[in-house]
Image (tube, rainbow, N blue to C red):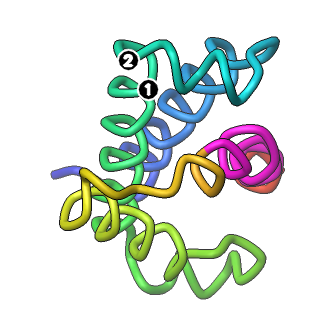
Amino acid sequence: MKHDGYYLAKIIADLEFVIAHTESITKNELEQNELLLDSILFRIIQIAENNAKLSEAYKASHPSVPWLAIKGMRNRIVHDYGVVDLTIIYDTVKNGMPEMLKRLKQ
């Protein structure tokens, strides 16, 4: 049976992948790199899917992680794919994801 540790490891792996592949990229470079952008959007969706499988007890014990915002971002990507605001994606990649990774590893 899968447990919080399993889903948490998958979330951390996705966060580390995105951070590693966007460390020195500008917003304009990201917008021009369709393959990387698609990969990042996929990873964000995967993070949200694994987030949904974490227990409520785990989420409650980590209130500094924006659990609802993660789900909201997934919904925007999935349901509004053609009009996703890349400024928000870029800010999430450069600021939100490193902060989330730091909080989850604590």
Measured from the top left, where is residue 30 in percent x and y?
59, 22
25 vs 50: above or below: above
Which one is in front, 85 or 69? 85
Q: Residue at x 65, y 51 (%)?
A: 87
60 vs 70: above or below: below
Q: Residue at x 74, y 53 (%)?
A: 96
Name the magenta segment's main secondary structure. helix
Is mark 1 in CB contact (under 8 Å) with mark 2? yes
Measured from the top left, where is residue 22 in percent x and y?
68, 19
* In this picture, residue 102 sits left or right of residue 88: right
84 vs 36: above or below: below
Residue tagged by mark 2?
Answer: 34
Which one is in front, 28 or 25? 28
Measured from the top left, where is residue 103 in percent x and y?
80, 56
**What range is drawn magenta here?**
90-102
Q: Which mark is residue 86?
A: none
Which one is in front, 40 or 30? 30
Q: Residue at x 70, y 30 (%)?
A: 27
Measured from the top left, where is residue 94 in percent x and y?
77, 38
Task: Using a 10 Å C-alpha cutoff, classify the residue at mark 2 as few (fewer than 14 neighbours), some (14 to 19) or many (20 or more).
Answer: few
The amino acid type found where label 2 is placed reads Glu
CA gap between label 1 and label 2 equals 5 Å
Mark count? 2
SS type, badge 1: helix
Magenta stretch: includes residue 91: yes
Which one is in front, 70 or 80? 80
The amino acid type found where label 1 is placed reads Leu
Residue tagged by mark 1?
Answer: 37
Q: Quadrant of residue 50?
A: bottom left
83 vs 23: above or below: below
